[in-house]
Amino acid sequence: MSQFNFEAIGTSWRIDIFRKLSEKEEMDLLAKVMARIEAFDKAYSRFRPDSQVTKMSKEKGEFVLPADAKPLMALYRDLYDRTGGLVTPLIGNLISDAGYDTEYSLRPKGELKPSVPWDEALEYDHPVLTIKKPVLLDFGAAGKGYLIDLVGEVLKAAGTAAYCIDAGGDILQKGLTPIRVGLEDPEDTEKVVGVYPLKNGSICGSAGNRRAWGNFTHIINPKTLESPRGISAVWVTAKKALIADAIATCLFFVPADTLSDAYDFEYALIHADRSIERSAGFNAEMFVI
């Protein structure tokens, strides 16, 4: 087995490849993985000054997005409509002003303003994204999950059929042997509240405990300008990490049945009172909490 460990896009990555690679094969494959991550980050990150997203925040006009943007933008538009605008890539200015900015200041900058409506700011006809007014986009709700899928495609193209990608706890696993994934207790990071057997799919989680400051977490309602408090943690499983990551954010705002007619996923969540809600197909062993 070969293993890569590195830091990228602000989180820790571990990639396990369930076959032995030569030293040269490892070096070549890691270079391809890092190049794929760099290309994605340069297009979609709001934290780097040379990204396309940063350029969009400063000037209006037409921007040609990468070929990989189509499924990402289509998903965001659909979830924007299904959640009544609560899940939106237009959250960037708000979340930055709340303190989750490029300097990670964690200090609000004056009075916060609701996010701009999609059709007021954006028009998308793949591959062209028209910025009607400069706006800071944020793809944090689904971007990491999508990047995990794209890295998986790099591994597959290199002849790797069995692997596990873990990027900050969001996981994509391929192979015949399932792995056991601990579900972190949102109130105690040294404990788990359950274990999920993951096989040929993805599990992504979201909780307010990892990135929290003042009255905010990294999840903010673009209309009320507040972070949701009724749910402590969410886990979602799906075939693709893109879907699992995005739905995990959505469930802080809307019930699962708002999305289940269009997306194939299972979920579990912990409410603020420590009660557990989960779908019938979320086959984790959950502990008494």
Image: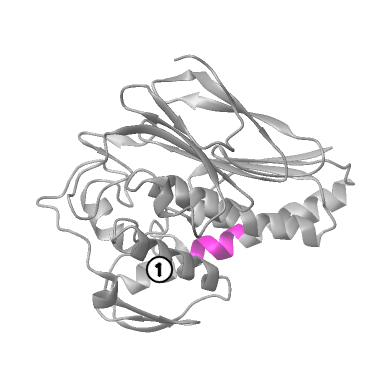
Q: Which residue range is magenta in the image?
A: 37-42
| Residue 180: x %, y % from top left | 68, 28
| Residue 19 sits in quarter | top right
Left or right side of 271 for 74:
right
Quadrant (top left, top right, bottom left, bottom right) of the N terminus: top right
| Residue 106: x %, y % from top left | 26, 41
Task: Reply above or below: 47 against 179.
Answer: below
Taking the spot 17% from the left edge, 59% from the top edge, the residue there is 114
Look at the magenta stretch and give its main secondary structure.
helix
Q: Nearer the viewer, residue 193 or 62?
A: 193
Q: Nearer the viewer, residue 47 or 198?
A: 198
Taking the spot 29% from the left edge, 58% from the top edge, the residue there is 91
Left or right side of 142 for 49:
left
| Residue 95: x %, y % from top left | 27, 51
Residue 39 on the magenta segment:
yes
Q: Which residue is mark 1?
A: 77
Quadrant (top left, top right, bottom left, bottom right) of the C terminus: top left
